[in-house]
Image (cartoon, rainbow, N blue to C red):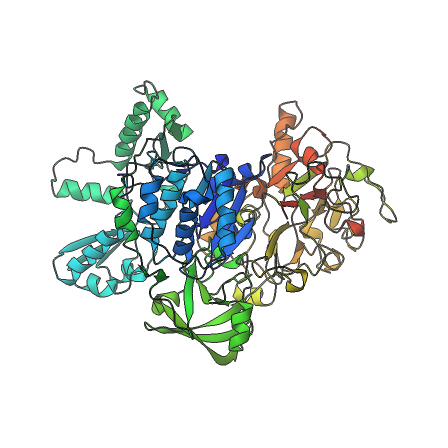
Amino acid sequence: ALFGAAELPVLDLARARSVVSFGADFLETWLSPVEQARAFMGARGAPDRARLTWIGPRLPMTGANADAWLRARPGGELPMALALLRFLLEPANGVTGLAPESKAILSALPRMEAGVPPEEIARLGRELASRRPSALLGPGVQSPDAVALAAVIQLTNYVLGNLGKTVQLGLGSEEDAPSPPPATLALLEQARRGELSALLVHRADLAGSLAGSADALRRIPLVVHFGEQLDETARLAHFVLPDRHALESFGDLSPRRGVVQLQQPAMTPLWDTRPASQVLLDLAAALKLPGVADSDFREVVRARSIAAAKALGAGPLEATQAQRDLLARGTFSAKAVAAPRPLRLEAVAQLLAASRLEGGRLLADPAAHELALVAFATPLAAADPTAPGWLREIPDALSGVSWSSWAELSPATASRLGIVAGEWIALRTSAGAAELAAVINPALHDGAVALPLDAPELRVLGSGGVQALRTGRSSQLPVTGHASQEGRELARTAPDAEDHPHPHPDPQGAGHAHPHAADHPRGGSLIAAHEHPAHRWAMSIDLDSCTGCQACVVACYAENNLPVAGPQAAREGRTMAWLRIQRSVEAGDKAAGKKAEDIRIAVLPSLCQQCDAAPCEPVCPVYATYHTAEGLNAQVYNRCIGTRYCANNCPYDVRVFNWRDPVFEEPLQLQLNPDVSVRSKGVMEKCTFCVQRIRFAEHTAKDEGRAVREGEVTPACVQTCPAQALSFGDNKDPAQRVSVLQRDPRAYRLLEEVNTLPAIAYLARRTRE
């Protein structure tokens, strides 16, 4: 409506000096989070550090990584966006270099209260004016004024000159555009009137995601479902045709203009399935439909990909070998230039009129005795019974809950209602009622109750005001970890160099530069120094780049055959993760002059530290854990007798014990890594920096008569980190990135006062006071 094209913008956050997110969790779930995390964290590590402001009623992981939080009331993002845009456009505020249409845009803006002190809006406006280019993102997963909010956000990007720089139009994919929600609702209305004779559904659960759609589907004489899950729509269908998995299929994709990606099977089909695309081609041939030339979907993909690559300048692809090379490479890209999009001023007033504004206030606010329902997305799927076990077992990054849905309340709201953590609460709306266990979250607006988006209870609750009532029942939620550092400063912070250009290392603090472990003064250690003649494998973890997304945790499960222990084991604290993200959520201290918004959320990837003076090694009675010549605290599983002395003596709590034999139900046994053993009951296990990958690289280098090169050994966690917060290499080579980072002024060792001499260095998160 604003720029004459229905498309999603392509974001270049690497160029942004200031980012403002109106509920868009772009580091975890919004649009392209892996790409966006890589780009934004790169901008954050630049000398002119990019700043992030989060606006919303609840902090997700993107908000936890923000430099500032404007705590909007639920549904209050639009008033803040309007107030911010008005501040930039008001001539009295002296912001220069704005778009020529600024005066006309200002005249179309309604006036209303922002919901936060005016000085907060002024501070943010001045930051955006001085730190260009910037990027404003949103709306998020839930916004009752999504259209108007999106319009205000893009208008702000336009007047600040962000379009064509950090927010690029004209680069979106021209294929496979999704149907707009009104079109889907119109289709269901046709079904209710009995106007549809057949419906083919491909990987879409209408009955499970849209209220009232099940009755509409029952009125259609023929419903055919293509997919992998027996979801609610599949259960209503007349024919259920199992589709091929992506790893069993051919296909192509153009995620944006200038990029062609090819898909080919990585394995033969496991079950009696057929690709939905091939079924449609066969159906078209049987019905003798015109315009269908190919009967083999593989040939359709080949022809499409070759034509698309040629259009991008790939050169001659007539030769068979050239086509094979393109398929083997899997992708082809060419430089694409963002298209200029002139603003359509006539659409501004129309879009803003579609919001719930009247007389400077929001309509349909909850009553005084009600809470607003806030749904939040998460990359995990604790409450989804159809999700893979990894995504249910790994706890939510902030609440620590796994295997279950839950309801979040702020401490003030919980205290007012007399609700404690773990107590079941009854939520009632005009649409329905549900009961969930309570989690107390300081990073939540006092007027809200928050539920994960995949919670089944969310479907019966609808939207609007919610009453929260005590039930008198309580239970032990599957919660792992402890959300406090207990004053130990495990996840440290350091002043940003922008404020302190010459930080002085503190030998006991965040600036401690740790030399090679074997040369470090050992103090009163009873363990003799180890020699590492060939390699000293080490890792550096930059807390300033870590988003807490837990992709590294999932990668560790996949690479090292970690079993899923289940919800009861989680309640008992017996998860099998070798790598976990420790969280700390600390509210602002009013006594110290802090506001409630001054919440510090810290995340800390925690794994075996591969200590040079490891406390686990001397206490093992059977020598199952020992120090290798390359600095690893190795674990010999078939020697371990399960005394757990090593776990008791580890100050980092990073060893796990097998309480039961692992079970990998059909077909999950096919996911097991053949290079890693499956451990049995009664055995201790832990991280060894993916030693199987280390050995593979060493054997390859030996066969080729050379040394291992930097980058040839990449543990699964390092490979998977979208923000590149983890670095791995040989600490004996001072030129390698891991060694350089371990000498950084922000580097420190975890619990270094216990003198274990870890091989992992953490880099303190940079902050600005």
Q: Is residue 301 above or below residue 237?
A: above
From the viewer's perspective, tell me whether residue 532 is left or right of residue 11: right
Considering depth in this image, is 185 or 276 the residue closer to the camera?
185
Residue at image location 28% in from the left, 38% down from the top: 175
- Percent position of residue 520, x then y: 82, 40
Q: Quadrant of residue 568?
A: bottom right
Q: How many marks?
A: 0
Quadrant of the image containing the N terminus? top left
**Residue extending farthest front:** 92
Considering depth in this image, is 458 or 366 the residue closer to the camera?
366
Residue at image location 57% in from the left, 61% down from the top: 596
Considering depth in this image, is 526 or 766 the residue closer to the camera?
766
- Percent position of residue 396, x then y: 52, 58
Q: Is residue 157 above or below residue 680?
A: above
- Percent position of residue 744, x then y: 70, 37
From the viewer's perspective, tell me whether residue 632 is left or right of residue 576: right
Q: Is residue 408 above or below residue 716?
A: below
- Percent position of residue 574, x then y: 61, 63
